[in-house]
Amino acid sequence: MDPGDDTIARFHYQFATAAIHAINIARGVGSAKAIICENFEDIILERHDSKFDAIQVKTSDRHRPPFKLSDNAVEKSLIRFIKLNMKFPGQFSGFYFETNHEMWSDKENSQNAEWVINEIRRNPRVKGLRRTNGKRAAVDKLRVRSNAPVDVVVETLSKTNFRSRKEDVTSVHSLLHQAMLTHPQCCDLKYHRIIALSDALIAAVFRASSRAQIAFSDRLYEVDG
């Protein structure tokens, strides 16, 4: 794939992911009531309980190795979550790393992000563990990199989830079309209108994500026929 096309595909993946969340909100599915794009995180969902969920969307070529905790994309995302939780204590219910790729799980050690998270949920205690212990090693590294207290790191990780779709970046459009078809007002539409509406929703997400001050008009996203 051309580098420019690849970059566009990755942005489209993030925008389509946000669009799927928006459709779920419109359907009344889940705990969210509003969506915020590119403000502190890639996506923030405002919940009905007035708290928030933060989402980082990361993509990778499917031929590449699965994500490890030490990989730049994962580590930076976790550090962002920790700093966000430290800046707004008690305001976030969950932190989500969403990817088209998958997480490494060959061994139970500090590189296995999901194992570390599960170990922290099972027992959040870190003090007293050997420095070579996988859970402690991961927490110590993130503590130093985020400059956060260990209790904030542990609390953040206990609220973190990984969503791995294990798909090519371009396949998210099919998921968006399927999500659109689940909405009562769209379920009887012809497929070409579903595609047009999906493209319009992605355009709306792009505008919501833009730093430019673009006046919103719902007429921009009307789809004829």
Image: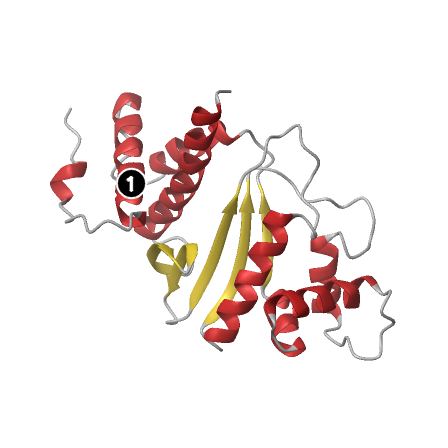
Identify which residue, 192 or 64, lies in the foreground. 64
Displayed quadrant of residue 142:
bottom right
Residue found at x 81% / y 61%: 134
10 Å neighbourhood of mark 1: few (<14), some, or many (≥20)?
A: few
| Quarter of image, res 160 | bottom right
Residue 187 in view in this figure: no
Q: Is residue 52 visible?
A: yes
Residue drawn at (15%, 35%) of the image: 222
What percent of the width, then of the height, locates residue 77?
56, 55
Q: Residue at x 35, y 34 (%)?
A: 181
Residue displayed at 67% across by 44% down: 67
> Quadrant location of the C terminus?
top left
Is 160 on the left or on the right of 49, as rendered? Answer: right
> Disc 1 residue type?
Pro
Percent coordinates x, y for residue 95 in the rendering? 53, 61
Q: Secondary structure at mark 1?
A: loop
Where residue 87 appears, x then y in whole percent? 47, 74
Q: In this orientation, which residue lies closer to the viewer: 121 or 217?
A: 217
Relative height, residue 147 to residue 101 (above, below): below
Q: Nearer the viewer, residue 19 or 150?
A: 150
Tell me how many marks there are.
Answer: 1
Question: As rendered, which of 161 and 64 lies closer to the eye?
Answer: 64
- Residue identifier under label 1: 184
- Considering only vertical position in the picture, is 221 above or below 130? above
Seen in the image, is 131 located left or right of residue 43? right
Q: How is the image coloured?
A: secondary structure
Q: Tell me: 2 left or right of 132.
A: left
